[in-house]
Amino acid sequence: MAATAVVLRLMPNDPPGEQGTTIDWAGVALLSATLVALMLGLLAVTGGGIPPLAVGGIVLVVAALAAAWVAVERRAVSPMVELRMLTAPALWSAAVLTIAIAAISAMLQTYVPKLFEVSGDGYGLGLDTTDIGLFMMPASIAGVLAGSVGGLAVQRYGARAVATTGAVATAGILVAVAALHDTVWQLVVARALAAFVGGLITTALLASTATAVAAKDTGIATSLLVVIRLIGAVAGGQLAGSVLDAGNDPASGVPAESAFVTGFLVAALVAVLSLLVVRHLKKEVQS
């Protein structure tokens, strides 16, 4: 509420946009329905006990909703998402990288608090909710600081260099935490470093996207990355939950330590695979 009051008072009004534009309510509704169906489908499938026919039905429902959304967006006068933009190499590569970074962040947001909470045989820290919140705070601060630093890094080295370095660093951090996760400081440092590097990559992707399209399309292009980030976060969270669920100890119901190690390594693999599309990013970003 306080932030809203500040924005209303201090933020200048934008100049009037093009006349005749309307909100793409059909696109909003169909994209929301597609994401909800995808999330619920992943929950149902990863939970187990669903016959193959039902799984096929879930896939068809998600595919049908996604196809309907694409059809609406292609015909809308003022589409929620300009799908034609994704045909540009710089934009589809930024979209893939955004999904990867969001998925990794969601996976860490699942694994690290759970490791803080679990008090297993030889692993876990058995912390309460308040302690977990405090130990996760450095990651939030690091993510905020990364925005400013990322802007300077992109101006100096270019978006491609920042994204490449960030992806390699992320993979290294995840491999390290897969091997070293026995103490509070190890998890706090790893989560904060991953959040900082993820913030750098996100800034680089936004800068690269903004300079790869016409000035009038900047808002649409960067908003597209926000929507895509949501998809990556949903997928990453469900993947993390599936890995932990598969590693549950039948007796205690607590994930085995090997499940966390596997999860960190899977996230590291996602970071490594993201390097395959970095080369399509815009190399330099003008300040």
Image (tube, rainbow, N blue to C red):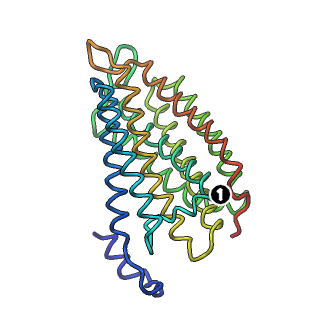
Q: Nearer the viewer, residue 63 or 272?
A: 63
Q: Position of residue 113 (x, y in %)?
A: 37, 35
| On screen, residue 202 above or below 164 | below
Q: Can you tell which quarter of the image residue 44 is in?
A: top left
| Quadrant (top left, top right, bottom left, bottom right) of the C terminus | bottom right
Q: Position of residue 93 (x, y in %)?
A: 62, 51
| Quadrant (top left, top right, bottom left, bottom right) of the N terminus | bottom left
| On screen, residue 125 above or below 86 | above
Q: Position of residue 9 (x, y in %)?
A: 36, 82
| On screen, residue 273 above or below 263 | below
Residue drawn at x 51%, y 47% is 99
Q: Is residue 228 left or right of residue 94?
A: left
Q: Can you tell which quarter of the image residue 71 is in?
A: bottom left
Q: Is residue 96 left or right of residue 235?
A: right
- Residue bearing mark 1: 90
Q: Position of residue 203 (x, y in %)?
A: 57, 58
Q: Is residue 209 left or right of residue 29?
A: right
Disc 1, SS: helix
Q: Nearer the viewer, residue 272 or 227?
A: 227
Residue drawn at x 71%, y 68% is 286
Q: Nearer the viewer, residue 91 or 74?
A: 74
Residue drawn at x 67%, y 48% is 278
Q: Residues within 10 Å of mark 1 (few under 14, many from 20)?
A: many
Residue drawn at x 37%, y 73% is 23
Total number of numbered discs in the rendering: 1
| On screen, residue 210 above or below 5 | above
Callout 1, which amino acid? Ala
